[in-house]
Structure formats: C-alpha cells, structure tokens
Image (tube, grey):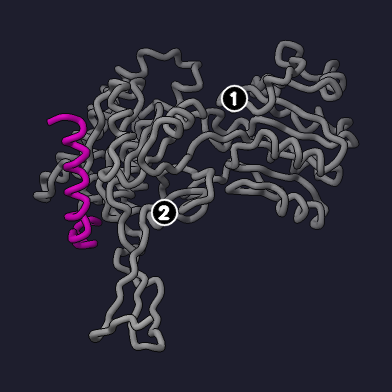
Amino acid sequence: MTVLDHIKRAKKLSYEAVSLKAALRDRVLCSLAQELHASTDVIIAENAKDLAALAPNDPMFDRLLLNKTRIENIATDIEKVATLPFSLGQVLEHKIMPNGLILDKVSVPLGVVAVIYESRPNVTLDVFSLCFKSGNSCVLRGGKDAFYSNVMLVKIIQKVLITYEIDPDFVYLLPPERENIKILLKATGFVDICIPRGGQSLIDFVRNNARVPVIETGAGIVHTYFDTEGDIEKGAKIINNAKTRRVSVCNALDCLIVHKSRLKDLYSLIAPLQESGVEAYADRAAYTILLSKYAQPLLQLATANDFGKEFLSYKMSIKTVDSVDEAIEHIGKYTSGHSEAIITENPDTAQYFVDRIDAAAVYINASTAFTDGAQFGMGIEVGISTQKLHARGPMALESLTSYKWIIHGAGHIRSC
C-alpha cells in the first residue's frame, strides 16, 4: 500500500471508530498502559538508538529521552484519559422551533487527525490515546530523531488493538522520508485536520504547503513583564521557574521585560538563573546594570535578533521598557500567541495587560510553565493551539471533536 492508500484507509476506519463502545475504548487504553509497563526495557533500548545521535548536554536530548520513570508517567496519563468523563454523541444544544422542527446539536469526532511533531516520542502515545478516546483515527509523523522510539511505540499500540480484534490501522505512522509529509498535507477529503507540533520552521512549512485544514501548535515565544509594582520575591521565583523548570518546552520563558524603574532590582530577579547557567542577552540599559554583577561569561549585549526568538535552551533575552504600554507593544510585535505573563501588585495594571495581550494563556503573578493540559485539569494534550479558530490553548479531548445538527421533522417542508 502507498502512503496515500494508508491515509485513505484511516479515513474509512474513522467512520467505524464512532461505533466502538466507550467502555471498549477505555479498556483498550488501560491495556495499553499495562503493555507499556511490560515493554519498558525494549522501549528504552530503542530509545537509546535515537539518543545515540545527540550529546547528553544538548537540550533536545531531554525532549527525546524515555526512561523508566517517564514511561510510567505516560502509562499513568493514559489511564487517566480512560477515566475522563467523556462520550461522543452528547447533545450540546436542544431546541424546538416554532414550526415544530426538533434540532439537536450533537458532538462528533473530527475524523482523521494527523499530527506532525518533532523529538518527543511521548506525543505518539498522547495523540493516539486522545484520538482513540474521542473516536478518531490518527496519522502520525514523528521526527527522524525519534524514529526507533516511535516505531516501537506504534507496534505496541497496534499489538493492543489486535488483542481486542480492532483494526491496527486506527493508528498509522508515516514513513520518515520528507516527501511523505507533502502527500499528507495534500490529502484533501481524507485528512480532516493536521496539527503541526514543533518549532516555527515546522509550523511555517505545514502552513505554506497544506491543503488540508491546519491548527498551529507548539511554537512559544514567551514573555514575562515585571512591572513597576511587581513583587521581587514573587518575581524571582516565577522567572526562575518559567525559565529553568524545563528549558526545551514551548512554555519556557524566552524574554524578560523589565520596567526601567525596577532595573535596580534586576539582578535580584535573575540571580537564581545565574546558578543554572542561563545566558542573558540584555539590552543596553539592562546590560549596564548587570555588568558588574551577573557572571560575565553568561552576560551578553543583546542584538535585534535576540528578541522574538524561541531559545529552547539556557538562554534568555532581557528588554527594558518605559511603561506597561511599551511592554505590551513589544510583546505584540514578537509574540507567537502562546503564553505571556505580568508580575504586578496593581490589579488595574494587571487587567489592562490582560485586556491587551493576544495570547492563548495570559498569566498574572504566575509562571508560564502552567500552560499544559494536565495543569489545566484537562489531562494530556495534543498540543497548545496558538490560533483562534476551533481550539485555543491546550487541546485535549473536546478539541478533537466537532458537532453536527440533527433535525427531526414530521413531513416538514419550507414554504418561503
């Protein structure tokens, strides 16, 4: 079978997915979690083949790594998906029209969900679990850097499906050759939605080449603004957590914006970053303040190219502003629409900031590290949507459904 044949088969199976009982879908997911526990050693062995191409100090190494603890956590997340109170065919709206027609707005699967992603092999399991629970089939294209890991994980998924006499092609892993991505992106009528999850270059490629509908996720150019009325103790903790908790994730801090009246407190705000080896690319005003305090090998004078950059590493830019409006203007120029934050004790300033920042998640006195499906009480996610149509923010089960109208009549005809 060709790649397109497999995609067409996924479309055919998507109609059958609707008829699978919810209890069966949940049992399959619980069995998948058990199979992951049983297959831990072989998963780690395959993952090691992928890791061999990276240096351990490469931030991408962490994104790619699967160890016993991470596999256990993935299995636990899948079990949680199985327990989530979710079912298809929910009546979202019911009304009776004056002419007697009965209208029901009912939730339905999207159909074929295609996800193109980089590095993280856990996405393979996350996407399948959410798609299967929500009645969708899925087409996956992981990065070449996670090839061995993804092949093994799909084999495990398909083994479980076969155990329950369910067609294993409910999940299809696209071969790694780049030309296959274009086949996927042009499969109109067979792919209902394509979700790129990765860096800006991947998202741009998908957007520029797709003929199928696309939801953009993943790229996070994240800012935190420390206001003239920001609390230093809160700020230092928030900034450190947002930057260093995991530097390779899309909600990690990229640019700290500081009101000029608080430059005297800048070193106190970022001193914890120095302990983690974070390189600071500071504009002239911030650089001057930090020059005698922040470790010299880690302090650089920023250039224009250091703003609007998703670092995904132990690097961060610093921008000085004269007002909250200038902070908002800077964010508006460079934001990817993912997560933005303000640190302030003034509720009016906080509300002013929230009202004018166009992003999926806007924080007041909290770390942007919380932009995550599990942290939002939604379970695992397909990704963080940075656009506004259909879904925005963490995309979990409900984001993988649409709806249709079902109209009950009694011989009704329209007269005008």
Q: How far across and how far down the image is residue 237, in percent?
A: 70, 39
Q: Are marks 2 and 1 in contact (CB under 8 Å)?
A: no
Name which of mark 2 and mark 1 comes first in the sequence: 1
* Quadrant assignment for the C terminus: bottom left
Q: Tell me the tag on residue 249.
A: none
Work out how far the residue at label 2 is from the one at label 1, CA to CA, in angstroms: 28 Å
Q: How far across and how far down the image is residue 156, in percent?
A: 20, 36
**At 17% from the left edge and 55% from the top edge, which residue is drawn?**
16
**At 29% from the left edge and 54% from the top edge, which residue is drawn?**
133
Q: Quadrant of residue 246?
A: top right
The amino acid on which the numbered mark 1 sits, given as a three-letter code, is Phe
The amino acid on which the numbered mark 2 sits, given as a three-letter code, is Ser
* Residue under pointer 2: 399
Inspect this view and state whether residue 174 appears: yes
* Nearer to the camera, 216 or 366: 216
Q: Is residue 3 magenta?
A: yes
Relative to 88, residue 171 above or below = above
- Crowding at dot 1, Cα within 10 Å, few <14 / some 14-19 / many 20+, comes out as many
In the rendered structure, the answer to whether residue 202 lies left or right of residue 87 reads right
* Nearer to the camera, 32 or 356: 356
Magenta residues, as a range? 1-26
Q: Tell me the tag on residue 311.
A: 1
